[in-house]
Image: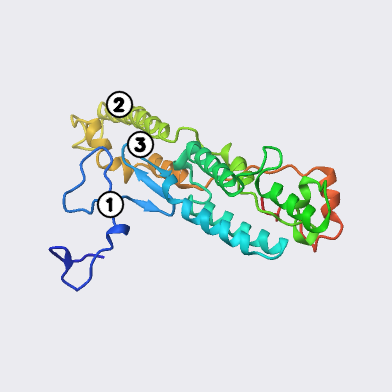
Amino acid sequence: MCCCLEGDDLLVGLKFNDTKTGSACVAGTIHPELPAGDIRWGFLKFDSNKMRFFIDQDNDNTPIVELRRQLAATKSVFGWVNAYNKYMKFFVRNFGGRPAQCLGREHVDEVIDTLARIQTELFPNSGSTQGGAVGHLRRVIADRFGVADLPQGYFYFPIGAGGLEVHDPMVEMFCLRASLISEPESLYAEGINMDLTYYNNVKESWENLSAMPYPPGLPGMEFMPFEEYTFPARFTRLESWRWRYIAQLSVATPADVVLTPSIGAALGGGWMGGNWIQMNY
């Protein structure tokens, strides 16, 4: 949408929300008429120096405080799990969800570290072996119902299979990590080298044709220089760059979790027609 500005206000009687308006420039200077705020999406903030989005650790504390309050207000174990699962999905969604290849493995590592920090802040009094959401639920169930030594899998099993269906987003992040490119920027350097190789091959073919009897106009004509070949056609006309962009914007696919015979037997009996492939991480 285009708007006409007059001073700080718009001619149409509207005004930009300065807290939600920003601009960034990579390898250059921001135009003075553009807003000076940060580029943000959810809990992500763009760093023009590093040329990537990163998690703004200063702005994700408020939801942690709110989640702690909501968890304390729940009256049942299932109510607690429901509130916890919704907030874990909220955090992951605002960290970018399942990342595209262009974000790279570094982004997933940052998400994993941040989720671990959230666990530590939510349950600061938990020990290393009994920490996190599962450790908290163990203590609650032991205090209320006198049941101890519950297996770890019980907390993650689907409710339809008799479990609590606790959502652990770190499992999905670890499954995604291996399928992400460690250095996505290296694909651009590789593409530029491929452009030069392809250009030299095409130029050689042109020169070979020029030496043969051919329609008038071709003999003696020089092939375009490399700079003309790559600019501006590199990003708009070269097929190799089209597929490179498609690959960079594709969402990473998590690795499959192996179904062990014991888990398969536990789920195969009466889990309301569900199957392993349809289960969430």
Residue 14 sits in which quadrant? bottom left
The residue wearing badge 2 is 208
Camera sees residue 56: no
Please rate how many residues cluster around mark 3, counting C-alpha atoms within 10 Å: few if below 14, some from 14 to 19, many from 20.
few
Q: Secondary structure at mark 2?
A: helix
Q: Secondary structure at mark 1?
A: loop
Vertical side of 43 occupied by 176: above or below? above
User: With 209 as the anchor, is 104 left or right in this view?
Assistant: right
Vertical side of 84 occupied by 110: above or below? above
Q: Nearer the viewer, mark 3 or mark 2?
A: 3
User: With 49 as the anchor, is 134 left or right in this view?
Assistant: right
- Amino acid type assigned to the residue bearing label 1 in the image: Gly
- Amino acid type assigned to the residue bearing label 3 in the image: Lys
Closer to the camera in the image, 281 or 100: 281
Q: Position of residue 238 (x, y in %)?
A: 35, 41
Colour scheme employed for the rendering of this structure: rainbow
The residue wearing badge 1 is 37
Camera sees residue 86: yes
Q: Which residue occupies 57% across, 39% down?
A: 177
Q: Secondary structure at mark 3?
A: loop
- Amino acid type assigned to the residue bearing label 2 in the image: Asn
Please rate how many residues cluster around mark 1, counting C-alpha atoms within 10 Å: few if below 14, some from 14 to 19, many from 20.
few
Closer to the camera in the image, 136 or 181: 136
The residue wearing badge 3 is 50
Label whose residue precedes the other's in the sequence (3 or 2): 3
Q: Position of residue 64 (x, y in %)?
A: 52, 53
Q: Nearer the viewer, mark 3 or mark 1?
A: 1
User: With 129 as the anchor, is 183 left or right in this view?
Assistant: left
Find the distance from the CA under tag 1 to the CA under tag 2: 55 Å
